[in-house]
Image: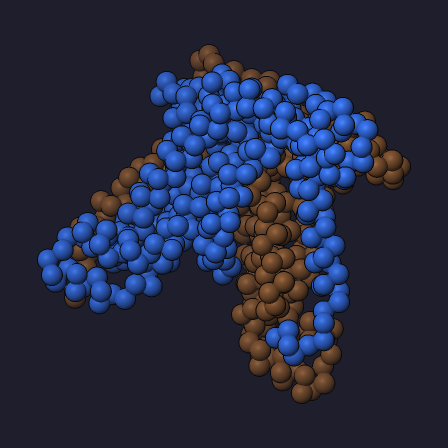
Chain colours: A blue, B brown
Amino acid sequence: MARLLRFNWLGGTFAWVWLLVVMIPLYWIVITSFKTQANYFVTNPLAPPTDLTFENYKTVIDNDFVRYFLNSVVVTVGAVIPATVISFMAAYAIVRGAGSRLLKAVNGLFLLGLAIPLQAVIIPVYLIIIRLKMYDTLGAIILPSIAFAIPLSVLVLSNFIRDVPKELFESMRMDGASEWGTLWRLAFPLTRPALVTVVIYNGLGIWNGFLLPLVLTQSPDQRTIPLALASFQGQFGVNIPAIAASVVLTTVPIVLLYAIGRRQLLSGLTAGFGK
Amino acid sequence: MTAAAQRVRGGNVAWMALPAFLMFLAFGVVPLLGVLALSFTTWNGIGEIVPSGTTSWRATLSDPGLPHALWVTFLIMALSWAVQTPMSILIGVFIAGRKRYREFLAVLFFIPLLLSSAAIAITYKSLLDPSFGLGSGLGIDALNQDWLGNATLAMATLIFIVSWQFIPFHSLIYQGAVRQIPTSMYEAAQIDGAGRWKQFWSITLPQLKYTIITSSTLMVVGSLTFFDLIYVLTAGGPGDATRALALLMYQQGFQANLMGPASAIAVILVLVGLVLSLVLRRLGGRADESQLEGA
């Protein structure tokens, strides 16, 4: 298409300007994280540091960063793996049992679930967590995270499983495989790209989640990274370079994952929403 | 295979949907019904839950904070839509071009989506600080405003940050949609002598109709749930200038310990979301009909 047309000046200008707008805050936060506090106040804020220091990172790590990081890892892994497995099972059942009215109803419920915002149900979720005596534990964050990952995961996965030719399922079943065996030996390898997408997408959402940890935990021991960031900000006050280091430190792992799984994430987003 | 056999076979796999179903029932459906029930009670978040009829509803509906929060929510929704949509379309059309550097642009564009709203809020809070931020550091007076301390500026800043966070995502949706427009349509238009501008208005934009509806639905319904960003950035301030519905609910429930009225606000949040989704869907349907009539 682009070949056929003259250069799109308007779109081009906007795109490059917006790239600057996107990059300046990111650039600023990275260079600031390597400046000393004294240097920060006297130098041009957009100039690279003249006195490169790792002191800010040390400050952040000394303030229990590792614990918060591990909490986030536990919550993310602990929610994403079960959420993906049970969503995959449900998606398989919905596609394979397409004649069943029961499964149709379950699928309808999940589709409706796409429209329920977490904010709207946070008070009853809080009540349930208290009654389960799980308040202020990482498990309290994990359970609702799993539940709210299910609707979109089932939607994306069932769309992919539906694309698997029916004959493949039938021949597996003819050979005497159970549905459970067919699920793992046939559907699982064939839907792997979709599974990776779902894992990355849910992982990102849960890693960055703020409301559940805010409402369902209270002690510093149970803090996850987004909550820790907010508390660092209060703690470090005007020590902007330390705040910058905390933001960079919490973002690096996701950017690394993005570098590895970019294609799956993008294809997943368009599969989920681009229709 | 007969329908009966199909149903039996469906029965064989139905159990596999059970774990997901139960999990979603417990933490999605039950809370949704629960929030309606809780809106007819009085509860401070710790003690006993006491049924109290319509007390919470009357308190919520007579609170001047509610119409204000609805107005703020509407303002955020409308302004962020009006800023994001044209820019996302422009950028999406541009990065849809199959050139390597445009792919590269798309990679960089995506980065804001990886950051948590908390990280973004903190970055901007430091960046815009009147004493220690970019404006004072560069010595540019125009940049050196009390961005988050003035009601109008705080709203404008919030809209800007929301755009910063989400324009990349919507550009990406448009990029995908533009690439699906058949090249032959443009070739035909070129033969007819249509220029770039005309092609955009008569081919690209009409072809993007459903994408515009999808993207707008995500923007509009999504803006109802902005919480993390506002909570960390302004906590609803200055005063109540950026106190949107979700934040009002949180403050009533978890800061003022008025879970009954907070639940009523949550019910309103769900209703507003549902109504908006339905209206947008209807809008999509009507556009579709008129096109059929035209053809």
Between B16 and A259, the residue placed more toward the observer is A259
Residue A252 visible to an observer of this rendering: yes
- Which quadrant of the figure has residue A171? bottom left
In the picture shown, does residue B268 fall above or below A19?
above
Residue A213 visible to an observer of this rendering: no
Most distant residue in the left direction: A176
- How many discs appear? 0
Most distant residue in the top direction: B47
Q: Is residue A225 left or right of residue A182?
A: right
Between B45 and B48, the residue placed more toward the observer is B45
Between A137 and B274, the residue placed more toward the observer is A137
Between A239 and B113, the residue placed more toward the observer is A239
Residue at 43 percent of width and 32 percent of height: A73
Q: Quadrant of the N terminus of chain B?
A: bottom left
- Which quadrant of the figure has residue B207? bottom right
Residue at 42 percent of width and 35 percent of height: A76
Residue B202 at x, y percent in the picture: 67, 74
Residue at 57 percent of width and 81 percent of height: B184
Residue at 46 percent of width and 50 percent of height: A261
Q: Is residue B30 left or right of residue A51?
A: left
Most distant residue in the right direction: B141
Q: Quadrant of the C terminus of chain B?
A: bottom right
Residue B272 at x, y percent in the picture: 58, 42
Residue B115 at x, y percent in the picture: 58, 40
In the picture shown, does residue A172 fall above or below A36?
below
Q: Is residue A5 left or right of residue A120?
A: right
Most distant residue in the front direction: A51
Residue B268 at x, y percent in the picture: 57, 36
